[in-house]
Amino acid sequence: MIIGLNTDSSTQRLKGPTRPINDEYSRALLLASLGFVDMVILFEEDTPYNLIDFVQPDVLVKGSDYKAEDIVGYDIVKAKGGEIKTLDFIEGFSSTGIIKKIQQEG
């Protein structure tokens, strides 16, 4: 499994100047420590399109808040006969939700 991970500057552009909470090195280290992860690749762009084009994955996974055909890289993966999978979010485990909870309790 290869994970594409937004850099800090990419995350800030997408989510604002107070994000990410954890720096890119810490996030990458945590993900890389999972036994099923083969590699974590940081990408600077706003989307992982160029990374997906380079890696040419057989399966592309994204959160279920996206329709498969709207997922960045859908065209690349489908063109080579690959699959697009979406995963449901687990309640209470989003960074945004954790930040809101801290702010409410603080």
Image (cartoon, rainbow, N blue to C red):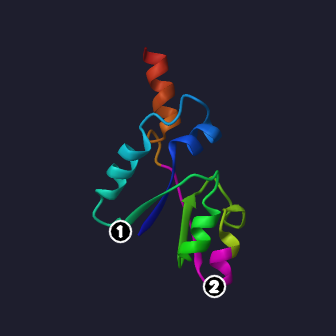
Residue 6 versus residue 100 in the image, above or below: below
Nearest to N terminus: mark 1 or mark 2: 1
For residue 38, which numbered disc appears in the image? 1
Left or right: where 87 falls relative to 76: left
The N terminus, quarter of image: bottom left
The amino acid type, in three-letter code, at marker 1 is Asp
Residue 69 versus residue 94 in the image, above or below: below
The stretch of residues the image draws in magenta is 76-89
Q: Which quarter of the figure has residue 16?
A: top right
Looking at this view, name the residue that lies furthest to the bottom: 81
Left or right: where 92 falls relative to 46: left
Q: Element at badge 2?
A: loop
Q: Position of residue 43 (x, y in %)?
A: 54, 56
Q: Residue at x 64, y 51 (%)?
A: 46
Residue 17 versus residue 56 in the image, above or below: above
Q: Residue at x 56, y 41 (%)?
A: 9
Q: Residue tagged by mark 2? A: 80
